[in-house]
Image: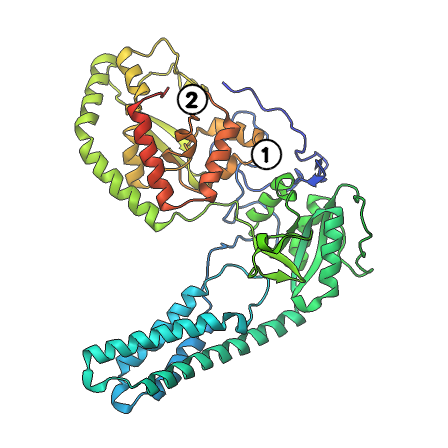
Amino acid sequence: MPPEPAAAAGRPSATGRFATTGGFATAGRSAPPRALAAPRPPRAPKTVPVLAPRRPSGGGPPGPVGPRRARPRRDGLLLVVDVTAGLLGALALAAEQRGPLWVVALAAGVGGWHARAARRGPALTVPGALAEAPGVWLRTAVAWAVFGTVVAALVPAHGLPPRTLVLGCATHALVSCAGRAVVYARRRAGLARQPHPVLVIGDARAVRRVAAALLRHPRCGVRPVGTVAVGPLPPGPPVPAPDAAGPPALHTVDDVRRALVQHGVRHVLVTGSEALRGQAPLLRMLTGYGRDLWHLDPAPVDPSQVGRRAPRLAGFPHAPLAPHGPRRTPIRKRALDMALSGLLLLLAAPVLALCATVIRLVDGPGVLFRQERIGRGGRPFTLLKFRTLRPADPREAATRWNVADDGRISTPCRFLRRTSLDELPQLWNVFRGDMSLVGPRPERPYFVGQFSRTYDGYADRHRMPSGITGLAQVEGLRGDTSIEDRARFDNAYIDTWSLWQDVCILLRTAAVIIRPTGG
């Protein structure tokens, strides 16, 4: 069994102040996110967060702190502009060519294409109409070319002459760009009158530099209302300090929570690259409260590393940080899970029946072993396995770490464990939606509580559904292996998820099963 976790350096202090680990801030104990929705380990401290909440709970700070999903959104106003532009462009068509279905299909199709291309998450700055103009013109031209081709193929008598196509396409694109310019100009004016309140977090010198720059450029639409700076000011050229009306320094978690509520802060700027690791607990807390995190690097950078199209805020490149809360399960992933798990259940039915018969003959009744595990979002579910060892009592089943070397395991059951055949009933968990074929392996509530307090990033594994296999498992991290390494591989899988990655992990898992090393 893993040892009880000890207090680690850089953990929240009992006073609620930001502790310093390598010069960066961590969150205090006085304002933890909601705990994992599962039975807590015996005598576990109630103040230890297991997973940052993504839905409102009974606790937490008062005021507007409900979570918001940072998923892509469509701009309804721009969609109206694009559809209107399409309808005006259709006026270039002759009367016999302006069939209602043709016009609606053209306007709605191009408008939807523009909307899909412009899908974006929370934004700090307003994009420019000129920057979007090339894409708008290109999509509009392609749509009109396809429209002309379809009309000529289906109704040759009403084919569109080149002049009509050019006039309609130009009108459509010009109106769309002009409408965008008006919408963006009004939004920039609104931000100039009422800029986004933000918190700035990072080392002392970077925080002062960013806050001073934002105050000198109010037209950027962002106003710092608080700073969290940890560590002494490092040597270097002097940095202009914000004026007397500048943002106050926040020293405790209560100060941060108060700033969130009083100013309605929805955006947090994280300065520097090293601050992401040292301030992970504080960032998890802010993400749990629904705030959008942005990484902003105030140091001079190589433009080739940032990219010419990287958005700028007062001249600083910035990019959204991935949320730490649960992610939506992609439809493609769920479709793959249902299709493969259903097919494998049918194909493996004889093997399932054989395994159940052997266990019943060798170890008596009770073929299936049911155990509570923690899945996506911290929700418990009942995991199914073939019973290869009858535990002495429920406490042993819930708290004993590894039974691979237990002498009570019979030879047939040891074979099932070594070949991972005892995991086959979990295909039913996958088909039901409790798990996925690929994902972080689910753990028991007792160990989830321990590991979440001991290893940074362990709780972040619950952002996606648990899996029968995963990146950590195909890298050899099974049984008595490093929990820290498992959490790192699991989070890397979540951060870089793709359907092809799932397929590759499944193929690698099949190779591992052929040369079994399970325990």
Task: Residue at the far bottom: name it.
Answer: 95
Q: Where is 87 relative to 221, above or below?
A: below
User: From the image, which quarter does the C terminus lie in?
Assistant: top left
Locate residue 506: give its quadrant: top left
The residue at which mark 2 appears reads as 479
Mark before the other along the chain sequence, 1 or 2:
1
Task: Residue at the far left: name it.
Answer: 350
Which mark's residue is nearer the viewer, 1 or 2? Answer: 2
Q: How many marks?
A: 2
The residue at which mark 1 appears reads as 48
Q: Nearer the viewer, residue 111 or 255?
A: 111
Residue 389 in the image: state x and y as whole percent.
33, 16
Q: Residue at x 57, y 34 (%)?
A: 456
Q: Residue at x 43, y 23 (%)?
A: 398
Asked if the residue at tag 2 contacts the one at tag 1, i.e. Cβ–Cβ closer than 8 Å, the answer is: no
Residue 349 in the image: state x and y as whole percent.
18, 30
Residue 392 visible to the viewer: yes
Q: Report the amino acid beneath label 2.
A: Gly
Q: Where is 57 relative to 395, above or below?
A: below
Graded by Cα atoms within 10 Å as few (under 14), some (14 to 19) or many (20 or more), the crowding at tag 2 reads some
Q: How is the image coloured?
A: rainbow
Q: Residue 483 carries which label?
A: none
Circle 2 SS class: loop
Q: Where is 191 relative to 235, above or below?
A: below
Residue 37 visible to the viewer: no
Q: Report the amino acid beneath label 1.
A: Val
Residue 323 as seen in the image, left or right of residue 515 = right
